């Protein structure tokens, strides 16, 4: 089992420009403190390399990559009311995307069946040409596109269990039928997209699954949607790689949403995914997205990594 991160990801600090920002370096510190206390659960730690520009260009136009780089080079600033990039954020963003890419290379190179990439900033809200929702580049989308473009894979399944709709990933793959994207998210909150009726477009129709749930939704609903609606479609898709956009803000303690999962709930979702993926012969990699209650976040990551590593 391989865990990827980089200390540069601790230097990205939206609170510098947007005081009190919930996407703070302490998130990653809390995760790593909890893992260190448990001997990293037996996982091997690796430094996330910086993503190469060609990798980012698989899903983002050059103008977007250059705009983020130039903003950071000039000292940085707020991009919108909740998205910030500072001087250290470009390197953090490269490591965050690069960790997801390195994990994917290791998974498809047969080094490991499971991986976790704990980078910041998160990625799933970043659209091709637009940073938003705390996200600069779409890390999981870059990794999925890399798998198909360079690593010999034809079908990638992305499960996004962050409590917010993964609008960036959805837009990037909206027209494609080689990436199955499924998102379970609380309806009616940021970013507002992800209606059940939106199933993708053109050749990608049927390759997007949006499952909004109401505020107050508990584990039972999340697990049944995953088991009864998402995994059967994924099984027919026969993915060769499974990536999880792993946000932990559906936890009941999270300040940004109103779902009611517990740390163990993420472990249960991870177990279902691992068991299914084993049946498909596909490795599983998780990429950190949201999760803003520090203790809940750390416990949820521990539960997820423990479940991913267990033999089903
Ligand atoms: Zn989120």
Image (cartoon, helix red, strand yellow):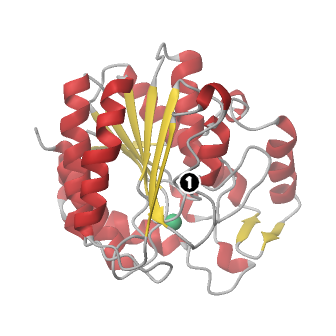
Q: Quadrant of the C terminus?
A: top left
Which residue lies under the disc numbered 1?
Answer: 166
Q: Is residue 49 visible?
A: no
**Residue 136: percent from left, percent from top:** 69, 54
Q: Is residue 137 visible?
A: yes
Name above or below for residue 265 compared with residue 40.
below
Name the residue rendered at 55%, 42% in the picture: 199
Answer left or right for 74 relative to 72. right
Name above or below for residue 166 compared with residue 84.
above
- Residue lying farthest top? 152
Name the residue rendered at 35%, 43% in the picture: 230
Name the residue rendered at 54%, 20% in the picture: 148
Name the residue rendered at 45%, 71% in the picture: 27
**Residue 194: percent from left, percent from top:** 57, 56
Q: Does dot 1 land on a helix, a strand or a loop?
A: loop
Q: Bin the neighbour count of mark 1 within 10 Å (Cα to Cα): few under 14, some 14-19, many 20 and up.
A: many
**Residue 269: percent from left, percent from top:** 25, 53
Name above or below for residue 230 compared with residue 123.
above
Name above or below for residue 298 compared with residue 119.
below
Query: Which quadrant would residue 132 be assigned to in this image?
Result: bottom right
- Residue lying farthest left? 311
């Amino acid at each position: 089992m391989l865990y990827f991160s980089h200390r540069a990801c601790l230097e990205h600090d939206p609170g510098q420009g947007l005081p009190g920002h919930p996407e703070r370096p302490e998130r990653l510190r809390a995760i790593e403190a909890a893992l260190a206390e448990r001997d990293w659960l037996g996982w091997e730690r690796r430094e996330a390399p910086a993503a190469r520009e060609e990798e980012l260009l698989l899903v983002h136009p050059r103008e977007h990559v250059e705009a983020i780089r130039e903003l950071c080079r000039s000292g940085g600033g707020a991009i919108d009311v909740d998205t910030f990039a500072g001087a250290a954020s470009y390197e953090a963003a490269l490591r965050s995307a690069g960790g997801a890419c390195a994990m994917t290379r290791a998974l498809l190179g047969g080094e490991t069946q499971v991986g976790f990439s704990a980078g910041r900033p998160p990625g799933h809200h970043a659209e091709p040409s637009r940073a938003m929702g705390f996200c600069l580049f779409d890390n999981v989308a870059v990794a999925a596109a890399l798998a198909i473009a360079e690593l010999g894979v034809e079908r990638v399944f992305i499960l996004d269990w962050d409590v917010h709709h993964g609008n960036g990933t959805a837009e990037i793959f909206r027209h494609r039928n080689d990436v199955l994207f499924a998102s379970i998210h609380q309806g009616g909150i940021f970013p507002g997209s992800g209606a059940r009726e939106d199933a993708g477009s053109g050749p990608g129709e049927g390759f997007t699954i949006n499952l909004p749930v109401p505020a107050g939704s508990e584990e039972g609903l999340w697990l049944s949607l995953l088991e009864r609606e998402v995994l059967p479609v994924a099984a027919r898709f026969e993915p060769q790689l499974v990536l999880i956009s792993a946000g932990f803000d559906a936890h009941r303690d999270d300040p940004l949403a109103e779902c009611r999962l517990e740390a163990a709930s993420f472990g249960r979702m991870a177990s279902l995914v691992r068991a299914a993926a084993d049946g498909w012969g596909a490795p599983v990699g998780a990429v950190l997205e949201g999760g803003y209650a520090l203790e809940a976040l750390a416990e949820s990551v521990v539960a997820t990594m423990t479940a991913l590593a267990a033999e089903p």
